[in-house]
Image (cartoon, grey):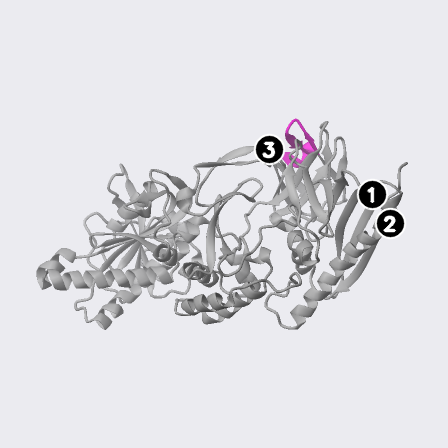
Amino acid sequence: MKYQPIRYDSERYYPMSVAEAWRLLADTDHLNRAIGLPSVEFSTLPDPLIRRAQARAFGVIPVRWHELPFDWIRERRYAVRREFEGGPVAIIVVGIELRPTEQGVTVRSYAECTPANISGRLVWRMARKSVTDLLDFCDHYLQRKEAGRVDPVPVPRGRPAVNRALLDQRLGQLASAAVRPELIGLLRQRIVEGSDDQLTRMRPFAVADLWGADRLEVLRLFLHATSAGLFQLRWELMCPNCRVPKAEAASLVQLPVQFHCDTCGIAYDADLDQRVELRFSVHPAIRRADGLVYCIGGPLRMPYTVAQQYIRPHEDRHIDLALTGPVQLRTVRAAHRLLLTPAPADSRARDITLTYSGGRWVGPHSLTRDDSLTVPGGSRLVLRNQTSGPILAAIDDLAWTGEATSAAQVTTLQEFRDLFSSEVLAPRQQLAVSHIAFLFSDLKGSTQLYEGIGDAAAYSRVNRHFDFIRQAVGRGGGSVIKTMGDGVMCAFYRLDDALATAIQLQGHVTAWCQEQGIDPPLTLKVGVHHGPAIAMTANDHLDYFGRTVNLAARVADQSRGGDVVILPEVLDQADQSTLDGRDDITTESFTARLRGLAHDQRLVRLMVAGVPSANPGPKARPMQPQVGLGLSGLVTGGPL
């Protein structure tokens, strides 16, 4: 006998934005944990899109089901279907719908239960409870928010077991570190009151956004907290396709050369940019946080995915999605991508059918060019699965989430290299870094310095100058990689930070020398370059090699002292605000033959007013001003 589905839904109005409601409710793992649902064990089925799940209802009764992938449209709705292997219920579909209002959002929560037998008709009471518990979760969130909680997201009932004596002892050590004091109290509150999932695999940038704090300051807090024994760090290997963790390593030396994503069915090379991410978990000596899973496929697990749809064979799925920028349509376990680009509204709204067949998405020829499709405003997408099997379609943002702390970024921080000097790659292992900036500096006239004042006095000045550079580079978000004679090699995650630090070095070195009693003041030669590099271990330290590094050193060779030299195309990549309003900086374009290169190179010299500089070297030949070069095309010698 077939039984009709029993549906229960309820809705409430809340004075919050749709985006805020989505962030709160789309983290389904935390939501299920907080409202008291049991933890779930998941295993892979022959169909990689569907997982077998089991849990214990009321902590006693074993329940097994097949869980289909979540369907969602960001900030609109989500739903998940569970097909049970036995018992009184055959199918349960649960979900939410968000509807914006003038003053906030209306949240509709629903559960649809299909009984397997007559007793299953009584299960609707459980469905009703899950609906009301979700809405009560929203009420509780607003109560905590009105009470002034920095993190108002509700947590499970009960007090976690925390070794408070050890916690306070290690927080005392943290108080003497170079971290913001106000962040220490927030950290203590999170450790004492946060749920287990809020203390495992933490992303410091996400925590910073929650606290309304500076991201780098919170990252520094987490690094010092790890050094003090409050946290443990983990390196997560991220699939570049589905962008979720697939494996982890306790240290850089344990990183594999390759890793595999079972969901996408693809093996990837590890790199330090987007495929290795640093996360933190509370130290078990402070508090034991379980690694239990309460939901594995919720939307916030993949925040970059605008929409996800599980489409059965020969099914059409209508998607109401207003595109605000380019996105890509893909099918899980398939390589093809179709770029969807928004366009002005057409004269008439229409459905645009995108058909999946033969491993590719195909749209109307009139709107398609190569692998890009134009979507006029007001149109509605229809995703058609023309294959004999189900597919999982995803529409993704092009940009990665900014909440990740990549290995490339953290390994260029001075605090990280100082606190975790043993974090190096395995011998002979080489990992790519696609974007990294290098600053090279050297002392001009150091030979004359040693000859003029003697070895001991000159060596003291050189060592103090290393400290000056190290402090300036650390404040600028970079790190000193190594010293070479009187020269220094520094690395930065961002070109803008490297360029700003280079200018600051030249602007402050004279005053610093006066404070140190160094007369005449030291003269620095500085160059900056940006591009890909190879990271590997050398002399027991993480180091960088490749053409970008070599070119950075050659560019710095062209400095005549008191200036910063950079390639014009690299200067064009820098944020203009780095130099905007700087009347104390002038530019000079010239050509020079860089050592090891066959042809002359165009270069730009940035000169800081008030900094003594030597006469141009014999290799520098002035150029005529160029037009259309961005920052590097400014008038030679003119103020910026």
Is 412 or 95 nearer to us in this picture? 95
Q: What element carries label 3?
A: loop
Asked if residue 200 is positioned above or below residue 67 in the image, the reply reads below
Q: Name the residue under label 3.
A: 336
Residue 477 position within the rendered picture, expressed as x and y whole percent measured from the top left: 39, 58
Query: Which span of residues is magenta-colored?
Result: 355-369
Q: Mark 2 points at which residue?
A: 122
Q: Which amino acid does label 3 sit on?
A: His
Question: What residue appears at the point 23 percent right and 68 percent down from the top-left corner?
Answer: 513
Q: Which residue lies furthest to the front in this view?
A: 60
- Contact between marks 3 and 2 (CB within 8 A): the answer is no
Q: Which mark is residue 88?
A: 1
Q: How many marks?
A: 3
Tell me how far mark 2 sits from mark 1, CA to CA. Answer: 9 Å
Is 328 or 138 nearer to us in this picture? 138
Q: Is residue 198 visible?
A: yes
Judge the density around disc 3: few (<14), some (14-19), many (≥20) Cα neighbours within 10 Å.
some
Name the side, left or right, on which 268 lies relative to 65: left
Tell me how far mark 1 sits from mark 3, CA to CA. Answer: 42 Å
Looking at the image, is mark 1 or mark 3 earlier in the sequence? 1
Looking at the image, is mark 2 or mark 1 earlier in the sequence? 1
